Image (tube, helix red, strand yellow):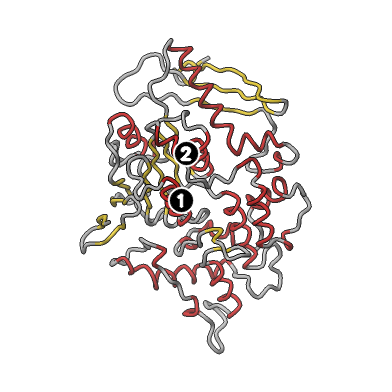
Amino acid sequence: MQRHGFPILGLVAFLDWETEVWVAAWIKSIWTTGPRFISPLLDRTTDTTGNSGSVFLDHPEVLNDFAFRAIHVEAVIGKQIVEAYYGRPHHKSYYIGCSTGGRQGTQEALKFPEDFDGIVAGSPATNFNNLQGWSAILGRFVGAPDPTGNPRFIPADLWNTIAAEVLKQCDGLDGVEDGIITEPDDCQFRPEAIVCTAGQTTGCLTSAQIDALHEIYQPLFGTSGELLYSRYDPGAEADGDAQTFFSGSIVSFPNDWYRFSVLNDSSFSFENFDLDTIELGDRLDPGGIQTFNGNLSTFEARGGKFLTYHGRRDQLIASGNSKRMYNLISQTLSMPSLDSFYRLFLIPGMDHCSGGPGAAAFGQGGIVSNVVSASSNNVLLAIVDWVEGGVAPDVIIGTSTDGQTRTHCRYPQRSVFNGSTFICEA
């Protein structure tokens, strides 16, 4: 069997009574110059319906596949296919993924540190249970699941007003007004600036809507005051997908996660969703999916390299969570700097995984994002150079849709405007 000139090899593995896995790899017989990658493809035979979580209900092994096992199986069997075809084992193994893929890459480094030599994990959905809780409660702040008659609900057209005011207050904090908030954590947005005055009924917010915004733009704390999740990034509301959270309905991901995985109650009403529900999900941690553990000691000790990035205008996963993950690893390993094996690049103006007004193309999303084929501009080439050549990426250079470039800094360095361009400062 061939596809685009590549022989395809595959095998079937039975993991348990619920899960059958079919893995294939596109194998090239004759290589030319340049990086040589073989990508195994994994397919599960359990029936799924797109992004629906209904398949998890009463199927704990399917949940385990999603939480931690699928990528590990793909790695193990993929290496076996390569060795069977070429008659020798692989040289190095790499992983690249974003969002859930970013979480899965992180989980690999935590649970199966031998699987990959280099990992690129973008916009990772780590701290998964609290991410789902935060995603649901953002909707609750504006009246979901039924905002009818709720004075806190904010109609879609008013989000344009809010986004404009956020930029007005915070765009210039980095020294240049370019439609990009370099450091959202510096933005202390005051929604009172657009409160309705006497007789004003359009293009402004009521006091109840102002209260909702204050809750949205602050971190989420638990019943005992502990930090559960980072705040919604000011600037992210400008993306059209912001309505995913604020449409008046509970977004599909937490809707399915709590009904089919945490509570095992498909009839659960989110009218009853609160901090207690979030904390219950965190305690139960179905499938061990949380992925918020700083112990990467084994991965680090074997010489593994980890490159992660996160857009500062991410409308689905707060970028502050990636800062928390970095700090958690640093504290757990007693390493003030993780530069020797773990580097986080924060990308101003980038939406979830890609897109946005920033310089958001740096090889992370296939050919379309590979604007410049060099390790300084391409995260996949950068991880290869780091693993195989010992050259760690000091910066990542991104390219915007209009061809502008910007240097992105590794955390905890800051991106600073020096009067003509952005540079990185410790």
Residue furthest front as drawn:
334
Q: Which residue is mark 1?
A: 328
**Residue at horizontal 33%, vertical 32%?**
387
The quadrant in which residue 342 appears is top left
Counting every numbered tag in the picture gives 2
What is the three-letter code of the residue carrying label 1? Leu
Q: Nearer the viewer, residue 254 or 17?
A: 17
Point out residue 82 in the picture as x, y percentages from the top left corner.
46, 17
Q: Which mark is residue 97?
A: 2
Q: Earlier in the sequence, mark 1 or mark 2?
A: 2
Q: Which mark is residue 115?
A: none
Q: Is residue 355 visible?
A: no
What is the three-letter code of the residue carrying label 2? Gly
In the rendered image, which quarter contains the C terminus? bottom left
**Residue at horizontal 54%, vertical 83%?**
196
For disc 2, the neighbor class at 10 Å (few under 14, some 14 to 19, many from 20) is many
**Residue at horizontal 63%, vertical 65%?**
223
Q: Nearer the viewer, residue 326 or 346?
A: 326
Taking 17 as reference, is 31 left or right?
left
Point out residue 209 in the picture as x, y percentages from the top left corner.
58, 75
